Amino acid sequence: MTTAVVVSDLDGTLLHRDTYAFEEALPGIALLKKSRIPVILVSSKTRAEIEPIREALGLEDPFVVENGGAAYIPRGTFEETVGKRDTSGRFDVIRWGTPYEEVVAILDGVREVTGARLTGFHDVDAERVASLTGLSLYEARRAKEREFDEPFWIEGDEGPHHRKALELLAERGLTMIRGGRFYHVMGGCDKGRAVGELLRLCRSRGDGVVSAGLGDAENDLPFLREVDRAYIVASSSDSNAALRRALPEARAVGPAPAGWAEAVTDFLAWLERPA
């Protein structure tokens, strides 16, 4: 028996990049539910952000937080993860990311050494995060509840100090990648590692697995390389253009959220093609 799985980014992919609306994606979610195809959300967002979105979408499947920092798996989904409980007891948890406190300490140290004007979420209050992202103040507070990944931006032009800072972050064991709005820095993880492990767990139940992946930015590249059929949701960002250059074989669809439903419809049609 073959199991289909959809793996999806959130911002700019399932959610509108600026308004975070998802209503136009709901027909696609309904089709997947009808076919009993799970939707694994894989985002740079925190657990505190993803849980209410997941509930609003009516999803009950595993999800990955903070660019692959950890996977939260509904209790009992996979026999192999039993015993890796979170404190709520509702999820089994697999953690890959370097703890947030270590990540920001390294970022602060590199900034001090180089003089680079790097500003992270830990440097600003929720009001500033809200103004930069278009999130409500309540949502911005949830965005600051970080465990693994630090979004940051460069103040002013990207000069030699900034390039040196990015080199030093790598030398200190951190990964830096560009998302739809910000750079992100983390250690020991990426979306591809997390998705690869979740797909392996799906296969461990004895089923064949065929997967689709939907993303819009450069930080989605690692997980789009793990799936059988990749879709790039259109946006005007530089990170979207970089993703299209890196993955020219991926299928292009329109902007979120309607483009998300477009990709789902194409994937379902592809699954039904003659063998």
Image (tube, grey):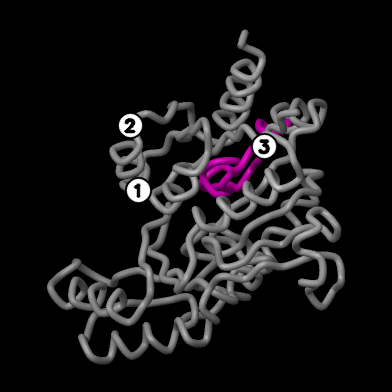
| Front label number (2 vs 1) | 2
Measured along the vertical axis of the image, is residue 158 above or below residue 31? below
Q: Which residue is mark 2?
A: 248
Q: Is residue 134 magenta?
A: no
Q: CA distance from mark 2 to mark 1?
A: 14 Å
| Front label number (3 vs 2) | 3
- Amino acid carrying label 2: it is Pro
Q: Which residue is mark 3?
A: 5
| Secondary structure state at the residue bearing disc 2 | loop
| Nearer to the camera, 10 or 33 | 33
Left or right of 87? Residue 109 is left
| Nearer to the camera, 76 or 260 | 76
Residue at position x 54%, y 60% from top?
Answer: 44
Q: Which numbered disc, 3 or 2, marks the residue that appears first in the sequence?
A: 3
| Secondary structure state at the residue bearing disc 1 | helix
Residue at position x 38%, y 64% from top?
Answer: 183
Identify the main secondary structure in magenta. loop
Assess whether mark 2 and mark 3 are in contact (beta carbons under 8 angstroms). Answer: no
Q: CA distance from mark 3 to mark 2?
A: 22 Å
Assess whether mark 1 and mark 3 are in contact (beta carbons under 8 angstroms). Answer: no
Residue 226 appears at what percent x and percent y? 50, 44
Residue 185 appears at what percent x and percent y? 41, 70
For the C terminus, the quadrant is top right
Extreme left residue here? 160
| Secondary structure state at the residue bearing disc 3 | strand
Which numbered tag is attached to residue 239? 1
Q: What segment carries the magenta color? A: 6-26
Extreme top residue here? 274
